[in-house]
Image (cartoon, rainbow, N blue to C red):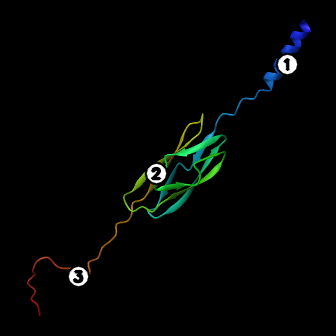
Amino acid sequence: MNRKVFFTIIAAAFALSGCKKDKDPELGASPASLSFAATEEAKTFNVTSNVDWTISGKPDWLTISDASGKGDKQITVTAAANTGAQREATLTVAAKGAKDVPITVMQAAAEAAASVNPNPTLPGDFGIENL
């Protein structure tokens, strides 16, 4: 009987020593912000992770090369040309069990178009007579 208990304890010890704990989820992204000109432009940031991740919070004026993945990946973000005021968004890189990583995206305002009047008129009469 003692022999049976001994082998049971040895078998349980081997079984437990063979169990591996899953790695803690790791998630990072850099740089933490991207700044775009008002014209259409593409820039990149890097995701570093040992688990599956997703990117959310994308507004209509941005496109991203990958909205999800696993492991390390370079992401291309393209901002459409801006015809209005400065705009901002926050992309969020998330993975189960890891702290979310925000990426701040800013795009400059469109430049105001200068207008030139080819026939300017001066206000009022300045006492100049027609010749």
Number of residue marks: 3
Q: Viewer-proximal residue, 5 or 109?
A: 5
Residue that mark 1 sits on: 11
Dividing the picture into quadrants, the one containing residue 7 is top right
**Dot 2 or dot 1, earlier in sequence:** 1
Hey, what amino acid is under mark 2?
Pro
Hey, what amino acid is under mark 1?
Ala
Q: Where in the figure is residue 119, as x and y percent of width and height? A: 23, 82
The reply to whether discs 2 and 1 touch (Cβ–Cβ < 8 Å) is: no
Q: Would residue 114 be found to the left or right of residue 60 on screen?
A: left
Residue that mark 2 sits on: 59
Q: Where in the figure is residue 17, as x and y percent of width and height? A: 80, 24
Q: Where in the figure is residue 34, as x and y percent of width and height? A: 51, 54
Q: CA distance from mark 3 to mark 2?
A: 43 Å
Mark 3 neighbour density, 10 Å: few (under 14) some (14–19) many (20 or more): few
**Dot 1 or dot 3, earlier in sequence:** 1
Residue that mark 3 sits on: 119
**Dot 3 or dot 2, earlier in sequence:** 2
Specify the farthest residue to the front.
Answer: 60
Q: Residue at x 51, y 62 (%)?
A: 41
Dividing the picture into quadrants, the one containing residue 22 is top right
Element carrying mark 2 = loop
Q: Residue at x 64, y 41 (%)?
A: 52
Q: CA distance from mark 2 to mark 1?
A: 56 Å
Position above or below: 4 against 64:
above
Position above or below: 51 against 73:
above
